[in-house]
Image: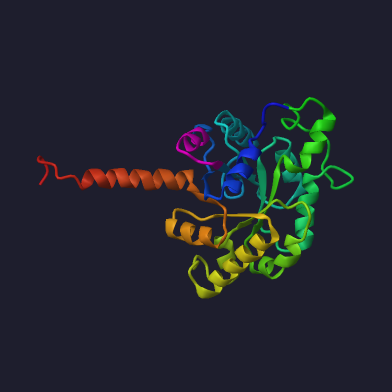
Amino acid sequence: MGKSVNYVERFRESIAEGRPVVGTEITLTDPLASEAAAEAGSDFLWIETEHSHLDLPSVVAHLLAARAAQIPAFVRVAWNDPVLIKRVIDLAPAGIIIPMVCTPEEAKTAVSAFRYPPNGIRGWGPVRNMMYFDSTDEYIAAAPNQVLCIIQIEHIDAVHNLDAILAVPGIHSIVIGPGDLSVSMGKPGKRDDPEIKKMIDTIISKTTASGLMIGTSIGFDTDTVCNWFEKGVQWFALGDTIGHISEGTAAVMQGVRDLKLSRYK
């Protein structure tokens, strides 16, 4: 095997370097969005299908764009459903993000969808997964770590069950969902609320102690990135394509309006 189908090893190497690993969420169908995000310096892409209109052909196009740019791409599926996971995992993303996992049983369901029997329920039908392997045996040996199983902790029930969730074999990374966590605690969007901060600190400390990787989707708040990185968070999805277009356009427009133009008083 000389080539990588998804560059997941680059993500692991970036984490091992100990620096903040940063990417962006892809929410538009055009694969040029992924190409542009990669060219702009993203370490990884988060292809968003839970809260977007992306369909499977769009996901394929973004994965191909990510591979052309030689960066890893994750896909967040819409729910912890083995059928949804099955259709994505055979496309060989670098990882699949499973939202709203609240119990160890739900975590086991997710992991099982990543594993072939006798260790799971994944059906045999690799599409891109085997393209750069010389034999089926070589692929089978690599398969458990080819696509990262990323469990999203974004509900207060999940925090209460976190020790048991972290003990489930086969999870590669935890990702914090601060938005839904705040909603589940009856404080929508109040990420700086002391109780919410306490729960987030609990997620960070317990996950780092477990040895699993940990990331988050956090918008454009660089102060929070610095704070959370110092506490142990390793990777960050910084906003999404629509947000970047909106913010960038607004900055350019305002910049022109702020010019001291001689013809305009």
55 displayed left or right of 132: left
Q: Which residue corresponds to the image point at 84% horizontal and 42% vertical from the top-left? A: 116
Where is 46 relative to 176, above or below? above
**Image spot of residue 22 (x, y percent):** 52, 47
83 displayed left or right of 190: right
Q: Nearer the viewer, residue 49 or 143?
A: 143
Please say whether residue 38 is one of the residues in the magenta stretch. yes
Q: Which residue corresponds to the image point at 43% horizontal and 45% vertical from the top-left? A: 244
Q: How many marks?
A: 0
Where is 49 relative to 211, above or below? above
196 displayed left or right of 161: left
When asked about the image quadrant of residue 48, the answer is: top right
Q: Which residue corresponds to the image point at 55% horizontal and 70% vertical from the top-left? A: 196
When asked about the image quadrant of residue 142, the answer is: top right
**Image spot of residue 60 (x, y percent):** 63, 33
**Image spot of residue 249 (x, y percent):** 35, 43
When asked about the image quadrant of residue 74, the answer is: top right
Single out the residue that lies furthest toward the bottom.
Answer: 195
Q: Nearer the viewer, residue 32 or 236?
A: 236
Single out the residue that lies furthest toward the front.
Answer: 17
Single out the residue that lies furthest toward the right.
Answer: 118
Where is 71 relative to 171, above or below? above
Q: Is residue 126 visible?
A: yes
Please say whether residue 32 is one of the residues in the magenta stretch. no
Residues rendered magenta in the picture: 33-44
Q: How is the image coloured?
A: rainbow
Indicate the quadrant containing the N terminus: top left, top right, bottom left or bottom right: top right
Q: Is residue 125 visible?
A: no
**Image spot of residue 127 (x, y percent):** 74, 30
23 displayed left or right of 59: left
